[in-house]
Image: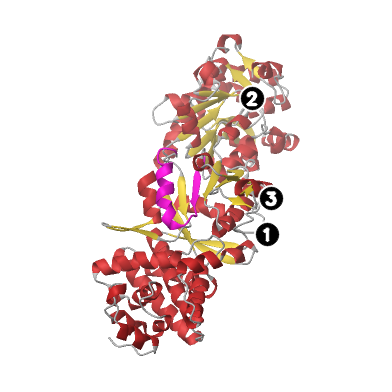
Amino acid sequence: MMERLASLSPRAGGLQTSGSWRAVSGLGPHLEPSQRVLKLWRSAHAVCFDIDCTVALNDQLDLLAEFMGVGESVAAITNSAMDGTMSLEEALEKRLNVINCTPADIQAFLKAHPAESRLTPGARELIHQLQGRGVAVYLISGGFRELCLPICRELGVPPKNLFANRMNWQVDDDTGMPTKLVGFDVREPTGHQGGKPRAIAELRRMFPYETVVMVGDGITDLEAVQQGGGADLFVGFGGVVARQVVMEQADWFVDSLEALREALPRHRVAMIGSGAWACTAVKLIAENMASPEAAEKFDSEVRMWVYEEEVAGRKLTELINETHENVKYMPGVPLGANVVACPDLLQTVKDATILVFCAPHQFIHRIVKQLVGHISKDMVAISLTKGMRVRPDGPQLISELIRKELGVDCSVLMGANIAGDIARGELSEATIAYNVLANGQLLQEVFERAYFYTTLVPDVVGAEMCGTLKNIVALAAGFVEGLGLGPNTRAAIMRAGLNEMRRFAKALYPTVRDDTFFESCGVADLIATCYGGRNRLVAKAYVEAEVAGRRASFEELEAQLLGGQKLQGALTSDEVQEILRRRGWERDYPLFTTVNRIVKALLPASSITEYKAAAALHVAEPAEASADDLARLALGGVKA
């Protein structure tokens, strides 16, 4: 850095060193940000930039002075002000007196020096990246609006976010036009010593900014962090002029704006799971992370935790990393060259800031236990897993488990998401339910594609209950299909199922919103799953085997039909039924109860069409099922 500083010339964007570099060469930690400084920079809600010799290559008034032929005289006054040997008010007045320009001179100057030619390298990119992260950007200058506004617009900063001085003009009595410069408006805070911290204090009064950073090259910028109500962090900039006092006292001193850009955090996404839905989701994510638009905010690499197993004599992770597809669970679908399969769970989540859970729900608790103590509390989590844990003290949704065990915020993504259809690029949609809006918006950037729409709703529990319970209804739809019945029966079952889903969710969690059931996570997911999901497929095969007289268990059919994927519906049915049994609600949810009795082989699949009467039967355990009851059900005659 010292060689770079020494090699730059003092004009046209080069470095002008004020004071001895040798005197400050031992700055040490100021040249590299401390952890405290880095955290403040990365968590800034607002960043205020000086203009002259910071986001612009020159002092704008000095450049105007050169244009007017009085450059050396004005530059000497400027350096006196920036080094603190002359007050800002005195320096401004003297500089304007020497320049003595007219409005026509300013117009000619702006034409000769367009804004784009005056920008410091990297300024536009840094400000664009900050704004893309939701950081408010302000320009606070001791210069003049007449010269700074074109730079402001070129940088994409709204003119209302510019704090600068204004020139005062004498107006010709005959023409009514300004003709002569007669000083500056002393009411602007930036025209006085301590003006920049006052401008920041005004911003804090107007907006609830928790962390404000000031970036600049001069003593007036340094003041912004030295006075009460000002900035929380001062970054000294020496890419144009390196001032000794600034180098000595800045919290962090940089010689390029690119250094600040590189220090901004980039989100890294990690996927926990490698089944069909996890592979489809990671494909969406990888496409987004590889886009040029994402480069400023996200790391392109996406790690995916894969439960290691052998496929054709090769490790599955090796095959995925070699072929860029999951040859076992999602063959023929390219995941993306930026997806890295990893068999080590902790290595997968290392440095991740966004964690996506998409593993069978019965394994999540064990996975989460392994992650405790190995992730940051600032991490954003999202669950694509559908299911719940049943404990003695009550049910626990997967998002609740993750939030409780890891201490992180956890959103959910639920919707009409048949993995194969999405993998082929067919139009699909999903609901992202959030607790923290900013996290929901961030996750929308992670998942949204031109063929995959996402909608945000503030109802995590409602969306997750929809995604969990619809698998039970999908089993019922599969039974109906296996029996060869038509759309009327399936529609009746689906309507009754949606009603039980809504009532059960609200009985357990009264805050659940009715509107959530009309989102993709609700009725759309129910329709898609009842017509195309794996639960429907296995339930249909179960009935067909029963009708053919070759009864097969759900476990056997899962192994035969799903290629290693897990069937969630049967397990969820058991979990929900345990809650219903403990609370005495079995007859209140007749469809859920009847589905579970069919799953447990307590009732024939044909009883699904008489689910109200079937649920009223006393069939608590297999040993207690009456032979007469089973016989009547097999013949289609149900008695309560």
Please state which amino acid type lies under the numbered disc 1. Gly
**Mark nearer the N terminus (2 vs 1):** 2
| Mark 2: secondary structure | loop
| Mark 3: secondary structure | helix
Q: Which residue ends up furthest to the right in the rendered image?
A: 112
Q: Would you say 380 lies left or right of 532 here? A: left
Residue 441's place in the image compared with 180, above or below, is below
Q: Would you say 461 lies left or right of 428 here? A: left
Label 1: few (<14), some or many (≥20) within 10 Å?
A: few
**Mark nearer the N terminus (2 vs 3):** 2
Relative image position of residue 318 (x, y in whole percent)? 64, 45
Label 2 to label 3: alpha-carbon separation: 46 Å
Q: Nearer the viewer, residue 372 or 296?
A: 372
Q: What residue is disc 1 on?
A: 332
The answer to whether one can see residue 207 in this image is no
- Callout 1–callout 3 Cβ contact below 8 Å: no
Please state which amino acid type lies under the numbered disc 3. Thr
Relative image position of residue 483 (x, y in whole percent)? 49, 84
Is 235 magenta? The answer is no
Label 2 to label 1: alpha-carbon separation: 51 Å
Q: Which mark is residue 361?
A: none
Relative image position of residue 509 (x, y in whole percent)? 31, 63
The part of the chain drawn in magenta is 352-374
Q: What residue is disc 2 on?
A: 239
Relative image position of residue 121 (x, y in whole percent)? 68, 32
Q: What residue is disc 3 on?
A: 323
Q: Would you say 593 lies left or right of 78 here? A: left
